[in-house]
Image (cartoon, helix red, strand yellow):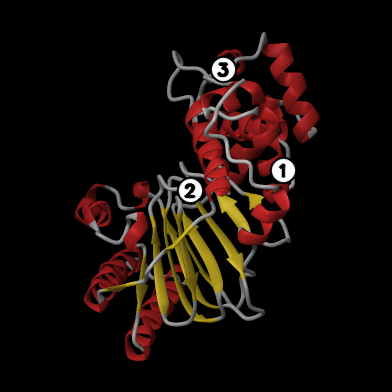
């Protein structure tokens, strides 16, 4: 395959200007995750990872201590204390911790959490100006940061409490969080990412879009490492080296992981038959799908669906 635009940067040079080890893990949100999650960074360890889009969740996190590198799309932010970030579900993001301490909170909000009674709050999220890549991080004064931290603490307590109206309290706090952050109004300046890193992001984006099976008539679009490389107009070996160097996995391993994640999603979130899921994922037959799934999960697709159903109803 010939392409004069393929960069020739040596991997050692690329690594020096990009991310350091440990490698960034590609993580998908659990297929049975709650529609609202809030955690305290002091209690919930911060890991270095890349999260592909189609996370389905809006994510907001606030830092009270520590430092780290946040990338959203091809925008890089070197974050520190008294800053808040807003991540849209459709954007690929990654996080790299650069300090031992990491204080603050984060919350994940699925659009389904709002429901009809709070559709106006969902519209606020959809229209909020900081859920775009070049305005995603807001600098706060110490006083503003204290106010934001108190709002997160309030949601954290409500989420773990037994009040019947706790969802209403959380929704009010979310609106207040957006308001206080918008009042601060000081966006962090982004730093350009190395050119080679763009290929990793574009591969993950293409991988996500190719493996989204929306209905019984849709199916996966691309299946092999070569097909993905051709779509990105880059040599397979070059793309494979970049991806493996920064995630620790080959293109083939990422493709299989994403295939497994989509299989789990369809098993948990739909009532499709195993044969329908097998067809949608491009397997030659139900037996081939079952064999692949059992090899990866040590349980049949039917067994996984039953177990997941029990967990969801506990």
Pointer 2 or 1: first along the chain? 2
The residue pinned by badge 3 equals 273
Pointer 2 or 3: first along the chain? 2
Quadrant into which the N terminus falls = top right
Identify whether 209 is placed above or below 276.
Answer: below
Mark 2 falls on what kind of element? loop
Q: CA distance from mark 2 to mark 3?
A: 31 Å
Identify whether 147 is placed above or below 92.
Answer: below
- Residue 163 visible to the viewer: yes
The residue pinned by badge 2 equals 92
Mark 3 falls on what kind of element? loop
Is the residue marked by circle 2 packed among few (<14), some (14-19), or many (20+) residues within 10 Å? many
Residue at screen point 62% across, 73% down? 98
- Image coords of residue 286 (percent x, y): 67, 12
Circles 2 and 3, Cβ within 8 Å, touching? The answer is: no
- Image coords of residue 188 (percent x, y): 37, 71
Q: Nearer the viewer, residue 100 or 121?
A: 100
Q: CA distance from mark 3 to mark 1?
A: 35 Å
Is the residue marked by circle 1 packed among few (<14), some (14-19), or many (20+) residues within 10 Å? some
- Residue 224 visible to the viewer: no
Mark 1 falls on what kind of element? helix
Which numbered tag is attached to residue 244?
1
Q: Nearer the viewer, residue 188 or 120?
A: 188
Pointer 3 or 1: first along the chain? 1
Answer left or right for 131 relative to 41: left
């Amino acid at each position: 395959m010939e392409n004069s635009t393929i960069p020739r940067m040596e991997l050692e040079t690329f690594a020096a200007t990009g991310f350091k080890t440990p490698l960034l893990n590609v993580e998908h949100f659990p297929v049975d995750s709650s529609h609202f999650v809030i955690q305290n960074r002091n209690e919930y360890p911060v890991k270095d990872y890349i999260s592909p889009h189609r996370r389905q969740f809006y994510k907001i996190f606030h830092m009270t201590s520590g430092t780290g590198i946040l990338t959203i799309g091809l925008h890089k932010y070197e974050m520190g204390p008294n800053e808040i970030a807003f991540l849209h579900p459709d954007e690929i993001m990654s996080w790299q911790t650069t300090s031992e301490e990491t204080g603050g909170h984060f919350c994940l909000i699925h659009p389904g959490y709002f429901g009809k009674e709070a559709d106006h709050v969902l519209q606020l999220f959809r229209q909020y100006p900081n859920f775009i890549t070049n305005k995603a991080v807001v600098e706060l004064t110490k006083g503003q940061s204290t106010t934001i931290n108190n709002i997160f603490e309030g949601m954290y307590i409500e989420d773990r409490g037994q009040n019947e109206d706790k969802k209403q309290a959380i929704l009010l706090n979310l609106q207040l969080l957006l308001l206080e952050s918008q009042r601060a109004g000081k966006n962090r300046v982004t730093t350009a990412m190395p050119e080679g890193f763009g290929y990793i992001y574009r591969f993950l984006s293409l991988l996500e879009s190719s493996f989204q099976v929306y209905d019984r008539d849709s199916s996966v679009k691309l299946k092999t490492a070569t097909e993905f490389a051709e779509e990105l107009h880059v040599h397979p070996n070059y793309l494979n080296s970049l991806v493996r160097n920064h995630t620790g996995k080959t293109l083939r391993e990422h493709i299989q992981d994403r295939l497994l994640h989509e299989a789990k999603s369809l098993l948990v979130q739909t009532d499709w038959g195993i044969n329908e899921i097998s067809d949608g994922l491009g397997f030659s037959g139900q037996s081939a799908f079952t064999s692949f799934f059992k090899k990866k999960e040590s349980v049949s697709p039917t067994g996984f669906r039953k177990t997941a159903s029990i967990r969801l109803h506990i």
